[in-house]
Amino acid sequence: MMALVIAGREFRNLFLSPLAWTMLAVLQFILSFMFLAQLDYYLMLQPRLEGLDDAPGVTDAIVAPLFGNAGVILMLVTPLLTMRLVSEERRNRTLSLLFTAPISMTEIIVGKYLGVLAFLFVVIGMLTLMPLSLYLGGSLDTGKLLANVLALILLVSAYAAVGLFMSTLSNHPTVAAISSFGAILLLWILDWSSQSSEKVGGVFQYLSMLRHYEGLLRGLVSTTDLCYFVLFIALFLVLSIQRLDNDRLQS
Amino acid sequence: MKKLIQANQLTRYYGTYCAVREVSFSLVRGEILGFLGPNGAGKTTTMQMICGNLAPTAGEIKINGIDILDEPKKAKRSLGYLPELPPVYRDLTVDEYLGYCGRLHGLQGAAQRKAVDVAKGRTGLGDVGQRLIGNLSKGFQQRVGIAQAIVHMPLVIILDEPTVGLDPIQIHEIRELIRDLGQEHGVILSTHILSEVQAVCSHVQIINRGQLVLNTSIEGLEQQMRASSLILGLGATPDVSSLRGIESVLDVEDLGEGRYRVFHHHHENPASELARLAIQSGWPLLELTPERRSMEEIFLEITQTEQTPKEALA
């Protein structure tokens, strides 16, 4: 309950600065540009695809690449949203307001997490409107579309969890932003090294976010991938709670 | 009477540095406790521990009978805290901010709006509700900080240097407010301004180098301020040895021009005997005043006597 109070404040706070509005505008512009480019490309290829037996449908040809790109772009954007969550409050010494109020550390972290997640859901919602517009002129594989949306939701939730954790580590928002970007990018490309050795490769491949994301984008909603993201998010939230509690113990 | 705050043997280390050592005290309703000490004495650390912002290395704190370490959420319901820097969000308006503070303490809907109005009324923020906190002056931001601490009507209000950076009129208003709050709440006030303690507090504690060196009521402090000396002014040159002859007189110091400082035992006042002696000896008695020590002197005396043995050890 108290977490929702904090979440509401965080969400509204984002819209007090031009940051959120700019972000929504820029993201929408770039993503719709990509969407249109993809659509154009598909229309160009369509006559040739018709002849094939196992041709990719509209969903495979347009939606999956669009969500794939969105995953990469949000990797750049999420750290900017999460960087201020805790570090700015620590810097401005406003954390004591939350520490003195009758709320637990868990509620503070969960509240801040939900607040930023709500904003990211707005971004995903606006992105999803684009493929939905295709229903005007044709039909989509709804199951696959939903799998794509779910994939992106899980992915940005994981980004936000890392970003929040990095924000609890630092007093400087920019430091938090750069470290969360680094951490996310590393986790994303971790499977590049998997070719080098068979043994370690498997572990790295499993840890890489890209692998799990791609699986879901193909429309393959497997428990392994879902568990990966849920565990990933839970891990970073628990670490954030621990880190914030450390402020009280160590300082 | 039920104790609102009960602190036992609070100790806090930062690494190997001991910021607060075995501090114990209590607070009941209707008391305004002044927490005095030089900078770096451990005032803020102690307050942060009471408010649950900092965990003590050892010791226990009970707020209204509830241990803040065991049941922090329950204990914190009775707390309002204004840190040194008011924890305000500069990009919110006063109303938005206070509403948020109220909701954090579990107030909702009409009750929350009413609480915000009451808090604004008490701190004189009625006209600036729609203004951004970042655009307000330092004094008004400080008031917003105080309003934040009282919005949920806590039993205990803890104010860390609430009058720093305010102009004299504002200081006067804030002191009035604190006195007012002291009627129905328990208030702890930290400051390094001695006259402030004299002006508003009912009890005073002096902390130095992390240790409590004085814990007394304001009357007790008045007692301390009564020095054991008199100024005696005579129109003739007296026989100093006959002054010394009075039983309760310890020493006489010649200040020149017929004025003498007469030191005496703390509990026996030789004024009447001095007057009798002067009249008997035919010395014109011009002045006979008990000397008072200022709080500054007491403060310096207490904090410095504490200092000497430690330095001797080092």
Image (cartoon, grey):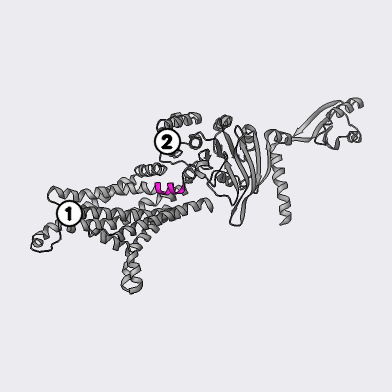
For residue A202, which quarter of the picture? Answer: bottom left
Closer-to-camera residue (B67/A110): B67
| Residue designated by label 1 | A141
Point out residue A19 in the picture as x, y percentages from the top left corner. 34, 47
Q: Which residues are magenta?
A: A104-111
Q: Chain of mark 1?
A: A
Q: Respond whether the residues carrying marks 1 and 2 are from the same subunit.
A: no
**Residue A171 in sight here:** no
Q: CA distance from mark 1 to mark 2?
A: 47 Å
Seen at 35% across and 68% down, the residue is: A203
Which chain hosts label 2?
B
Residue B247 appears in view: yes
Q: Quadrant of residue A217?
A: bottom left
Amino acid type, mark 2: Gly
Label 2, on which residue?
B99
- From the viewer's perspective, is residue B125 above or below residue A229? above
Question: Disc number at residue A12?
Answer: none
The mark closer to the camera, 1 or 2, is 1
Give how far across and how far down residue A220 sits, in percent.
24, 59
Is A110 one of the magenta-colored residues? yes
Indicate whether residue B181 is drawn in magenta: no
Q: Amino acid at mark 1?
A: Asp
Give the quarter of the figure containing the N terminus of chain A. top left
- In percent of the image, x 46 and y 41: which residue is there? B88
Give the x, y percent position of residue B128. Answer: 43, 31
The x and y percentages for residue B121 are 48, 28
